[in-house]
Amino acid sequence: MLVIVPAWNEETTLAAVVEETRRALLDAGVPADILVVDDGSDDATGAVAEASGAFVAHLAVNLGVGGAMRTGYRYARRQGYAATVQVDADGQHNPADIPALLSVLADGADIVIGARVAGDGAYLARGPRRWAMSMLSGTISRIAHTRLTDTTSGFKACGPRAIALFARSYPAEYLGDTVESLVVAARTHLVIREVGVVMRPRAGGQPSHGPARSAAFLGRAVLALGLALTRPRPELRGTFRQYEELDA
Amino acid sequence: MLLSQSGYPFALVVAALLLIALFWLLRTQRLREKYSVLWFAVIVGVVLLTFIPSITGWLTALAGVTTPINLVFILAFLVLLVVCIQLSIEISSLEESARTVAEEVALLRLELERRTGRPDQPDPPEE
């Protein structure tokens, strides 16, 4: 199992996230490697990551979460990992939830989303942002034939078929790492499930909220979803042929 | 049509200068041949309109536009629009290539570090 941590200018929180993840997986008895993808950070993120003892892929330029994650999936595929979990470097995701995600994955899902639910440090969205999120969840639920409540969560576990797909085509567009990647997966008939997890407040950095930003989010979400739905279907056969070759 | 009494010599001079500039850019390899085609087409169009101005009148009747000069403006606008879109497409494809290359380089560096067993000295943060 490979934990992928995309990190862009997260020097303050990264070391703790890597350490906590390592300990949580050790406690749960899950053998895992941790790959930090340093997304062209301007600060000491790369050095912090090296010092943490995780594998580190240094992107020479900032590619955004999509580029960082595709790097992670490519690595996972080449090294033959059977599962990956994406954990954000800001400490929002509780690594203690990873075993829950993995157990649903083991039940036959290709992608398991850690969906933000009410609880301590609950994720509260209001106004346009909330409408956008429920619109996204509703639409993606329909095409994925399952009930999804939080499709903008970055906390995700992927099985071999999803890794093969994402190593090849992981969208770099806005919301591509969450919304569009799910649309691509659903249209490729991958099985998507979700598990409720409690999101913690960010250990550092500022959340991007505010009415204007929320409205912009709504507009861009509609655009991203519309584009994702009308794009040509990703090539099924090629992806899975490669995956079968990997198996052989 | 008396050339000296019109703006046509001016248009011809402009077309000639553009042509020279394009050739120079191509010769010094600052412009790839595939991007020059459209500009050559524009120059040919300008030269044609200069020598055979009646084309404009004919096209105007065909397009249902009243004033010939408006048609010329619309065509010029459309050409510029197409060029802009073409450049956007090229930029998008360049970004995708750069993204793929950056990802591969990062993975190669990781592979190298794992095999040699010593991490590179991370780059100092840029000022």
Image: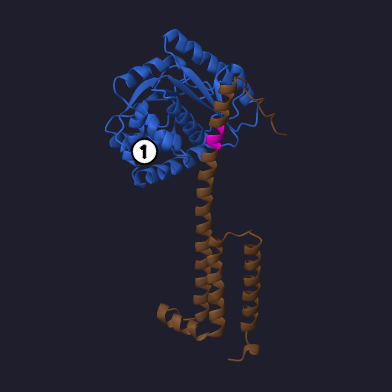
Residue A84 occupies which quadrant of the picture?
top left
Q: Is residue A102 magenta?
A: no
Residue A76 lies, in percent from the top left, at 45, 26
Which quarter of the rendering shows the N terminus of chain B?
Answer: bottom right
Compared with A69, A14 (above or below) is above
User: Are there few (<14), some (14-19), or many (20+) residues within 10 Å of tag 1?
Assistant: many
The residue positioned 37% from the left and 16% from the top of the image is A100
Residue at the limit of the structure toward the left, as seen here? A145
Residue A104 lies, in percent from the top left, at 32, 20
The residue positioned 34% from the left and 42% from the top of the image is A235
Which quarter of the rendering shows the C terminus of chain B?
Answer: top right
Judging from the image, mark 1 belongs to the subunit labelled: A
Apparent colour of chain A: blue
Q: Considering the whole magenta stretch, tell me its main secondary structure.
A: helix
Residue B118 occupies which quadrant of the picture?
top right
User: Is residue A29 among what the camera can see?
Assistant: yes
Compared with B85, A189 (above or below) is above
Chain appearing in brown on the rendered image? B
Between A151 and B126, which is closer to the camera in this rendering?
A: B126
Residue type at mark 1 is Val
- The residue where tag 1 is placed is A184
Compared with A50, A178 (above or below) is below
Part of the protein shown in magenta? B102-106
Between B62 and A79, which is closer to the camera in this rendering?
A: A79
Between B118 and A7, which is closer to the camera in this rendering?
A: B118
Residue at the limit of the structure toward the bottom, as seen here? B2
The residue positioned 42% from the left and 9% from the top of the image is A29
SS category of the residue bearing label 1: helix
